[in-house]
């Protein structure tokens, strides 16, 4: 089932169920992204936050808090925290990657400049830490602070690994766990912590977010080679042009003959890309069944996410989150 084939997509069903809490999150985000002294901060932040993102990560916090029976106000604060951390990393990523498009719109660094993107990202990180302190839980603070550090660590690891053909699937997984899955798992885990879940259920929530985040990133890497720009807001081949050694390419490099390896060395390691190279890359990926094998890996991680959820009590939200695990992979079917 493709992205547009689902009648009601799980993230839309989740958004409808959580609409009041999401409205409160959006209100809090608008309040906290304001700056009395630096009007560029809300300008840059609004450009990205209001660009039509699905709010998936903050929804995960709201959803797990509801599923675990939380009835207080701080799920909204932590959902906003998660969105601020995510937005800050996007602003920084677009500078590092020299990206020109995000969610179908020009990136903030293109519309303003790199300095604005980096500094506004820093401001949002600071706002995130202010928000995560407000529930008064050291456990919540520990989880989210660790996630922020792990995200930065994953991004730095990617700098050295992304253009090195010696990078294997183990290092790729370490990068993905850092730059993507860490925030998913923190988002799901803190919902349970707010509700006072025991250690086993808290671990199940962590495992769900971790596996979902990995499946999501692998699917995202697939979309770069077989996605629709209108649906994804990304041009097909952006990762190739940016010389990112993502999982499909790692699988193709592992199976490459001498001529194919020389191609990857020229295009990825040395950055000498020529007319027709993207088409050649796609042909090599097809020759080694790299996209299908990558898709199977994404399916496997979605299965792990569902298995983690099965360790939690029955709840209507649990069913939606189970469907979500299938959906993040189905969007590239």
Image: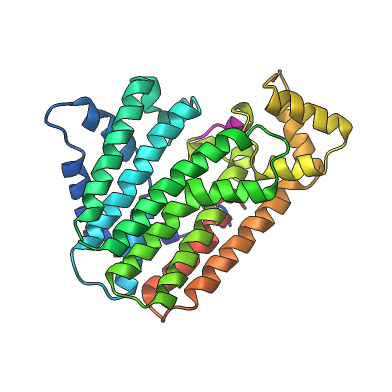
Residue 36 is at least partly visible in this image:
yes
Q: Main secondary structure of the magenta part?
A: loop
Question: x, y (%) of residue 72?
Answer: 19, 68
Residue that protrudes farthest toward the left in the picture: 36
Q: Which residues are magenta?
A: 234-239
Locate the N terminus by quadrant. Answer: bottom right
> What colour scheme has been applied to the protein in the rendered image?
rainbow
Quarter occupied by residue 200: bottom left
Quarter occupied by residue 33: top left
Determine if the magenta segment contains residue 235.
yes
- Vertical placement of residue 79 versus 276, above or below: below
Residue 52 is at least partly visible in this image:
no
Question: x, y (%) of residue 101?
Answer: 45, 29
- Vertical placement of residue 145 versus 36, above or below: below
* Horizontal side, residue 20 vs residue 318: left or right: left
Question: x, y (%) of residue 279?
Answer: 73, 29
Question: x, y (%) of residue 115?
Answer: 34, 22
Going 79% across and 37% down the picture, which residue do you hit?
Answer: 284
Determine if the magenta segment contains residue 311.
no
- Vertical placement of residue 163 versus 131, above or below: above
Closest to the observer, 63 or 139: 139
Going 45% across and 34% down the picture, which residue do you hit?
Answer: 93
Going 55% across and 48% down the picture, which residue do you hit?
Answer: 176
Number of numbered discs on residues: 0
* Horizontal side, residue 320 vs residue 297: left or right: left
Residue that protrudes farthest toward the right in the picture: 258
């Amino acid at each position: 089932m493709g992205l547009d084939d689902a009648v009601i997509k799980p993230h839309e069903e989740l958004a409808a169920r959580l609409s009041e809490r999401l409205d409160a999150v959006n209100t809090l985000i608008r309040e906290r992204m304001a700056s009395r002294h630096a009007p560029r901060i809300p300008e840059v932040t609004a450009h990205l936050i209001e660009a039509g993102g699905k709010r998936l990560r903050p929804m995960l916090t709201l959803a797990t808090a509801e599923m675990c029976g939380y009835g207080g106000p701080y799920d909204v604060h932590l959902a906003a925290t998660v969105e601020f951390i995510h937005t800050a990393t996007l602003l920084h990523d677009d500078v590092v990657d020299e990206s020109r498009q995000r969610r179908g719109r020009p990136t903030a660094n293109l519309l303003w400049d790199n300095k604005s993107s980096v500094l506004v990202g820093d401001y949002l990180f600071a706002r995130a830490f202010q928000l995560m302190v407000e529930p008064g839980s050291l456990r919540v603070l520990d989880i989210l602070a660790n996630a922020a550090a792990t995200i930065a660590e994953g991004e730095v690891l990617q700098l050295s690994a992304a253009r090195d053909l010696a990078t294997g699937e183990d290092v790729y997984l370490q990068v993905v766990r850092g730059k993507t899955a860490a925030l998913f798992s923190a988002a799901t885990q803190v919902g349970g912590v707010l509700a006072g879940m025991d250690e086993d259920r808290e671990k199940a929530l962590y495992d769900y977010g971790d596996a979902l985040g990995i499946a999501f990133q692998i699917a995202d890497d697939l979309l770069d080679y077989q996605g629709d720009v209108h649906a994804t807001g990304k041009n097909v081949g952006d990762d190739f042009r940016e010389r990112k050694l993502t999982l499909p390419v790692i699988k193709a490099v592992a199976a490459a003959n001498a001529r194919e390896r020389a191609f990857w060395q020229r295009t990825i390691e040395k950055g000498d890309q020529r007319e027709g190279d993207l088409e050649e890359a796609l042909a090599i990926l097809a020759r080694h069944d790299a996209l299908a094998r990558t898709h199977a890996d994404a399916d496997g991680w979605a299965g792990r996410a569902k298995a983690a959820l099965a360790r939690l009590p029955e709840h209507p939200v649990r069913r939606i989150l189970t469907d979500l695990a299938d959906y993040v992979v189905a969007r590239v079917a």
